[in-house]
Image: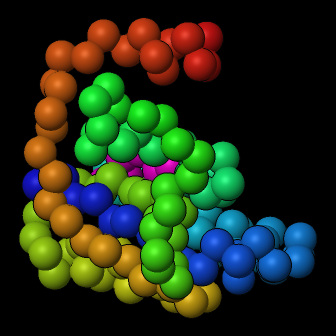
Amino acid sequence: MLYSILCYHSEKAVGAWTPAQESATMEKLAGVQKNLVQQGKLGPVLRLMPTTTATTLRKEQSPPVIVDGPFAETKEQLLGFYVVDCASREEVHEIARQLAAANPGGAYEIRPVAVFNPHGDGKVAAARHG
């Protein structure tokens, strides 16, 4: 089964990391990712850009309006996510524990996911990486 591991943390705290702290954390996370690749369990891993770069489509109005920012009234923001293929909840929980050990602070939200568009043509990925 596919699971998402949503990575939440204080954007302000992560933004205050020194280059050395950032590099050390990314190196630890890369080790966890490498192990998951070797096990055939790792899908996409994406890091979201800061909330200052975000826009939101508000549907309450007609026509809908695009506004700056996510305007979430929370202490932690969604900073990125992993998609992993695991046989059980226990397995995905163990992966989340490994990620938590590599990445100080924050929280991980774990949810099963379903493939919504299994027949995507890959044009976005090809255009971006091509």
Q: Which residue: 13% across, 75% down?
A: 89
Where does residue 64 sit, x and y in percent of width and height?
A: 34, 32
In the rendered image, residue 45 lying in the magenta stretch gets the answer yes
Q: Is residue 74 left or right of residue 52?
A: left
Query: Furthest-right residue in view?
Result: 19
Rendered view: 13 above or below 43:
below
Residue 9, given in percent of the width and then of the height, sits at 54, 78
Q: Is residue 55 visible?
A: yes
Pick whichever, 69 or 60, lies toward us: 60
Magenta part, dominant SS:
strand
- Snapshot quadrant of residue 102: bottom right
- Depth check, front residue: 112 or 34: 112
Colour setting: rainbow
Left or right position of 33 against 22: left
Which residue is at 42% across, 34% downward?
A: 65
- Left or right, 57 with respect to 71, comes to left
Quadrant placement of the N terminus: bottom left
Camera-side residue of 65 and 18 = 65
Q: What is the number of callouts on the image? A: 0
Magenta residues span 41-46
Residue 57 magenta-drawn? no
Look at 46% across and 68% down and name the residue there: 72
Residue 8, percent from left and from top: 47, 74
Residue lying at 43% horizontally and 58% vertically, measured from the top left: 81
Query: Can you give x and y, in whole percent of width and height, for residue 99 in the image?
Result: 47, 77
User: Is residue 103 visible to us here?
Assistant: no
* Vertical placement of residue 63 versus 47, above or below: above
Q: Is residue 48 above or below residue 111?
A: above
The image quadrant of residue 114 is top left
Q: Which quarter of the figure is the C terminus placed in? A: top right
